Image (cartoon, rainbow, N blue to C red):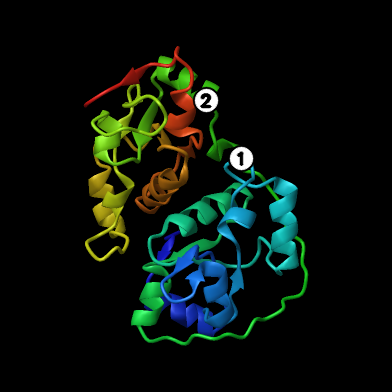
Amino acid sequence: MTIILSAEKAQKKVMTQSIIPVDVRIKDEVYGTGKEAYKHQHLPGAVYLDFKEDISGKDSFFPEIEQIKTTLEEKGINRQMAILLYDEGNHRAASKAYVLLTYLGHEEVYILDGGARAWKEAGYEWTDEVIERDKTVFDVQLQQDLLVQIDEVKAQLEEKKSVHIDARIYEKYSGETASGYGKDGHIKGAQNFPAKNVMDANGRWRSSTSLQKQFASVKEKQEHIVSCGTGNSACINVVALKEAGFKNVKLYAGGFKEWSQDDQNEIEKKS
């Protein structure tokens, strides 16, 4: 299943009400915050999820399972509904929301290519009408294999069964630029595929064919662990790898920040 939908394809699904738009914008040029922007204009039938309050945890990468389950149920979203995620257009919030929903077991989740910006540029309908959906039940089926912890990363490095992909920009990956975490460089053995490179010059997702070429140097049959500094940019690469057809893709949300806190963990520079 393709994950990325063009504004044209998304609009057809939205207008036939065969998909529920979920607004995950963080910022807006006119209204400041994504939440405020949602109040004034959003895709028809859209509900809003707050990046900090709903998609992220207070002391963890993801929110508590019961918390997000309750939030989705109160907004009328269950696992049987097709979901269209859109942010302001940089795809960071939408990608994290995609990984979260996939982790919860949702199987039909899409991302609007270009986000709200693309929708506006296409001249499609906006509304300030907030539809109150009936409360439903979200049957959580956790996909535990989607996430890996630091001990698993260490084990996979020793066994050399995984390809580790670092989604940060090259300067941080190589150690030329400070990571901001006290140590610089990257997790030993990690390969660098900056998340920004999965987008074209217009900030739109590259085609699946183009993404396949971009990740051609990593073997499809191997396990792919993706990380960055603290997990957010890595989610973009998780989406990109899945869009390119890779099946065994996992997220190490702790990333270089967590890895660098232990002096026993090996760090490499320049590669």
Q: Secondary structure at mark 2?
A: helix
Q: Which mark is residue 60?
A: 1
Residue 217 sits above or below residue 117 on the image: above
**Residue 210 location (% of width, % of height):** 24, 54
Q: Residue furthest top?
A: 264
Residue 193 sits above or below residue 244 on the image: above
**Identity of the residue drawn at 55% across and 82% down:** 40
Q: Secondary structure at mark 1?
A: loop
**Identity of the residue drawn at 56% across and 73% down:** 36
**Residue 185 location (% of width, % of height):** 31, 26
Among the 4 quarters of the image, the one containing residue 49: bottom right
The quarter in which the C terminus is drawn is top left
Between the C-alphas of marks 1 and 2, the distance is 14 Å
Q: Nearer the viewer, residue 33 or 80?
A: 33
Do we see residue 20 in this rendering? Answer: no
Badge 2: residue crowd in 10 Å (few <14, some 14–19, many ≥20): some
Among the 4 quarters of the image, the one containing residue 121: bottom left
The quarter in which the N terminus is drawn is bottom left
**Identity of the residue drawn at 68% across and 66% down:** 77
Q: Earlier in the sequence, mark 1 or mark 2?
A: 1
**Residue 135 location (% of width, % of height):** 78, 69
Q: Nearer the viewer, residue 238 or 262?
A: 262
- Label 2 sits on residue: 150
**Residue 235 location (% of width, % of height):** 45, 47
What kind of residue is marked 2? Ile
